[in-house]
Image (cartoon, rainbow, N blue to C red):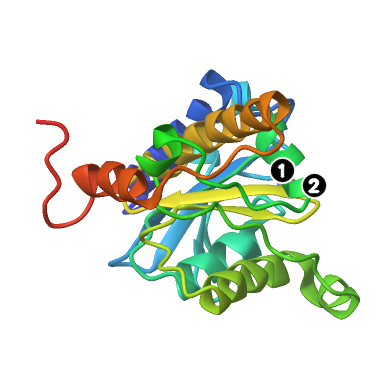
Amino acid sequence: MSEYAKLKTEACEANLEILRRNLALYTWGNVSVYDPERKVFAIKPSGVEYDKLTPASMVVIDLEGRVIEGNLKPSSDTATHRILYQQFPGIREICHTHSTYAVSWAQACRSVPVFGTTHADHGALDIPCTEYMGQAAVQNNYELETGLLIAETFRKRNINPLDMFMVLVAGHGPFTWGNDAGKAVYHAVVLEEICKMAFLTLSLNAEAASLPDHIIRKHWERKHGPNAYYGQ
Ligand SMILES: [Zn+2]
């Protein structure tokens, strides 16, 4: 059996979760799972329908972009995943979808304000939206530059990717990640819901304000950080 069997099973399972959670139409979207010891990740093959995915169809890639195992062509977004694993140490899974509300915010080029505790439970900051990618970057290596654009957005705003697991790429859509297998897709589901709630909030009150900082901190810190007490 392949030494990557467990990783490929995890990646297949995570990709199937996109389908179960209604986050993608057709073959849109992709998830990868990273093995920090071997420094490789398993990712969805390009253009294969979700109901045809099997662990054996996953493609294993190293951080230089070489195919280590797999017979199919990897997702066209593979270079974005690779750059994010390089730039954001500690993340173990990455998910990309074109879910409707998250894409709508990305197309409006708007970061998502913390309007309520659902958002604050998953991040104490606005969900950042990048700027549009420049022409030279698009022509150079679009998918690789997408990863660099995300990393640059976090650096410029001094955001720790282990405190904010979601980003919107302007005009494109969401990328999410997590520090464990299963977490990136979970964050993609949560992001879609937060974006929907934020849209509805603004449609009811275009002047809606962000949640006061003391409530944001309370909700974030009871689930994360040294004094977390949420859960069992
Ligand atoms: Zn996309």
Quadrant holding the C terminus: top left
Q: State yes or no: discs 1 and 2 in contact (Cβ < 8 Å).
A: yes
Q: Amino acid at mark 1?
A: Trp
Q: Which residue is mark 2?
A: 108
Q: Is residue 99 visible?
A: no
Question: Which residue in the protein does label 1 denote?
Answer: 105
> Where 185 sits versus 226, above or below?
above
As drawn, the label of residue 39 is: none
Amino acid type, label 2? Ala
Which residue is located at x 23 percent, y 43 percent?
223
Label 1 sits on a secondary structure element that is helix
Towards the viewer: 10 or 153: 153
Question: For residue 170, what is the image quadrant?
Answer: bottom right
Q: Position of residue 217 (x, y in %)?
A: 30, 50
Instruction: Sort mark 2 into few (<14), some (14-19) or many (20+) by Cα contacts within 10 Å.
Output: few
Question: Does mark 2's beta carbon lie closer than 8 Å to ligand 1?
Answer: no
Considering the image in quadrants, where does the N terminus appear?
top left
Query: What kind of element bears circle 2?
Result: loop
